[in-house]
Image (cartoon, rainbow, N blue to C red):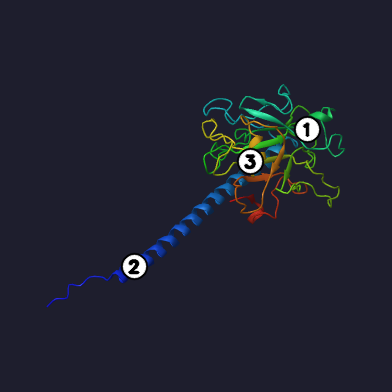
Amino acid sequence: MKNNSGFTLVEVMIVLIIFGLVMGAGFHLMRLYQQRAIMMEFKQDMSEIDVALAAYVAASDGVLPCPAALNAVPGTAAHGAAGNCTDMSTALGGCSGNAYCVLRGRGPIGNPAVDGRDGNAANRLRVRIGAVPFRALRLSSETALDPYGNRYLYAVTEYMADDTNSDFIYNPAGGALEVETAAGVSLIADPGAVPPIPAGSGALIVYSTGPNSFGAFGRAGAKVAACPGGQAETPNCRAIPGEPGAKQAQFVQEGFGDIGFDDRLKFSFPGLMLWSANEEAGPGGWLYGR
């Protein structure tokens, strides 16, 4: 007589448990692979932007490019084109529609280390935020988009992006933007440097709004998601055009892996060749959250 008995319930359960463990490990590895791929894309983008900025500064006797319009439609002349940082028609703390905003900088007025161009100390506190001017930097439009398809944010101290003064000398400690930890500790300041680097003296910052896309502008130049407020990254979000609140050049970077923070930032850091990231919050000198 043939034995037609099948699997017992215990055997089926063991098989299902093993299958679940294998699938769980597979999903975990896939997630790690995807995260690594995203970080590699960020690093590649920032490397290309870094090199392009250095080349631009070298070719323009130290002048940085002015941000492009965040809401420029692809295919138009304004898409990726550098703006005009000599145009001060937009008031400090105001915005030009959804194209760009002029943030109120944190740099100390009258700081002798600041190489002002116009003799107006207040104008040294103007920081313009918009999109990466990929045309001026001779980059592809794709490099100016983060891995989520949103436009990288680019903020620069306006007087350092004014190309009308031929005797301008680039000063990496002459900016007006600040980057702080969640505890309010400046990541720009270096009192031990010679000469000391004051807080609020960063020249520029490039950052992504991360996977939650709070405040971001997408590929087509339209707003993707509004800033909800009350988030760890709210200061970074509030600086973007189309968002309510004070427009200040005060950005925040929480520690590596902090919950509720997914922005990726890279900013000017005086004392290095042109600009760099703080070296202590992530691998490879990268500042980023989860």
Whether 250 is drawn above or below 10: the answer is above
Is there any visible trace of residue 214 in the rendered image?
A: yes
Q: Residues within 10 Å of mark 1 (few under 14, many from 20)?
A: many
Tag shown at residue 125 = 1
Which residue is at the front of the view, 90 or 50?
Answer: 90
Q: Earlier in the sequence, mark 3 or mark 1?
A: 1
Going by the numbered disc 1, the residue's amino acid type is Leu
Q: Residue at x 70, y 51 (%)?
A: 278
Q: Earlier in the sequence, mark 2 or mark 3?
A: 2
Quarter occupied by residue 86: top right
Report the residue marked by disc 2. 13
Report the residue marked by disc 3. 230
Going by the numbered disc 3, the residue's amino acid type is Gly
**At numbered mark 1, what does the secondary structure look like: helix, strand or loop?**
helix
Comparing labels 2 and 1, the label whose residue is closer to the camera: 2
**At numbered mark 2, what does the secondary structure look like: helix, strand or loop?**
helix
Q: What's the CA distance linking mark 2 and mark 1?
A: 67 Å
Q: Residue at x 65, y 44 (%)?
A: 50
